[in-house]
Amino acid sequence: MAGIYIHIPFCRHKCNYCNFYSLASTRNMDQVCNAIVSELQQRHDYLSGQKVETIYFGGGTPSMLGVQDIETILKTVYRNFAVVPDAEITLEANPDDLDPVKLQAFKNTGINRLSIGLQSFRQEDLNFLSRTHTPEQVIRCIADAQQAGFSNLSIDLIYGIPTLTDDGWIQNLQQAFSLGIPHISAYSLTVEDKTPLAVMIRKGKTTPVNENLSLSHYEILTRMMQANGYEHYEVSNFCLPGAYSRHNTAYWQGKSYLGIGPSAHSYNGCSRSWNVANISNYILSVASGMVESGTEILSPITRLNEYIMTTLRTMWGCNLDVFKQEFGQAMAENLLADAQHFIASGKMIYTENALKLTPEGILFADGIAADLFRDEEQAML
């Protein structure tokens, strides 16, 4: 099974913390949509006939597209790939793009999952993040989405915002629970280099992010999610039983995916490739039939380390049966041996032939994974 990611690089407004490739413009939108259709046709054999179980419109702000654009792109996917009947088809959306008519039209195209980037239910937080919607729009669009039949609904929340107290974060979470949202992605505010937020903090024009505040919010987050019946199935993702994102889970499990659009990445198990992060150059590259701007052939050790890193982020952990099949008995034994001190310290458990991080270990997921990495010299032992 495989997935298709479609990057829509347009936004109404570029948020001050965002470092994804997107432009606050609609210029060349029609040309990009046409190029996406052409790229899908050109790369129909990338997945080697694997069945496609997920399609994901990300960005940018895909909900800015017209319904006809979404419909055309989806029809092209279905004509060129073997899409399973119950495929998960996700559209990322902003609250200020959604109304009952557009939501129903999106639903009619085949979109069956919405991921709404609301970030906070509080106006002061939205102001800090330079978001353009209001709390009232957030609540209204969720109700409209549910009314349109989108039961598979996800929202994004950000914590660690300097304007967000512990009590405010608790209120945000309680509001989300009260709306019956089955999937919640919660991210700590990260100050990325060269973003407007980073510049403002460096110049002393806004309050810097406090790591202790972020840690407090994370502890509140995990406690309240568990108390309200949500599974902590990935470091930043929570869902009611069975409502996890099939598309993102496929990334963490190392499945193949095709990335379409400017700056999109693809992975086929052996290599990773990426498209140029420039709209004009992307349109020209598709027209020339030379879409990819770079490719990395992954060594066995790189694939092994990536498998450790991504699987440990999930509640399913690193399955040693799969690990043994992919990388060999000796590597599996070495991994289990290296994990013993994390097991002894309570940061990891070994159960059902899988290595899994404990709630304490999740706080150190990246560091633990790095300690378990192998290098080329160790691979020869």
Image (cartoon, rainbow, N blue to C red):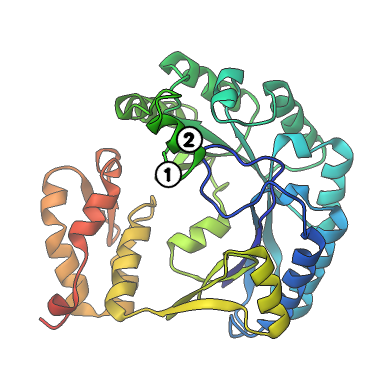
Q: Which residue is drawn at 42% across and 44% down?
A: 192
Q: Can residue 81 be seen in this view?
A: no
User: Mark 2 sits on what residue?
Assistant: 197
Give coordinates of residue 262: x percent, y percent: 62, 65
Q: Residue at x 64, y 85 (%)?
A: 45
Q: What residue type is labelled 2?
A: Leu
Which image quadrant: the C terminus?
Answer: bottom left
Asked if the residue at tag 2 contacts the one at tag 1, i.e. Cβ–Cβ closer than 8 Å, the answer is yes
Q: What element carries label 2?
A: helix
User: Mark 1 sits on what residue?
Assistant: 192
Query: How far is the residue under mark 1 from the one under mark 2?
Result: 8 Å
Q: Residue at x 19, y 66 (%)?
A: 335
Q: In this view, does 342 lie above or below 330?
A: above
Q: Is residue 86 above or below residue 131?
A: below
Q: Is residue 283 above or below residue 338?
A: below
Is 32 or 338 nearer to us in this picture? 32
- Is residue 237 rendered to the left or right of residue 281? left
Is 196 or 342 nearer to us in this picture? 196
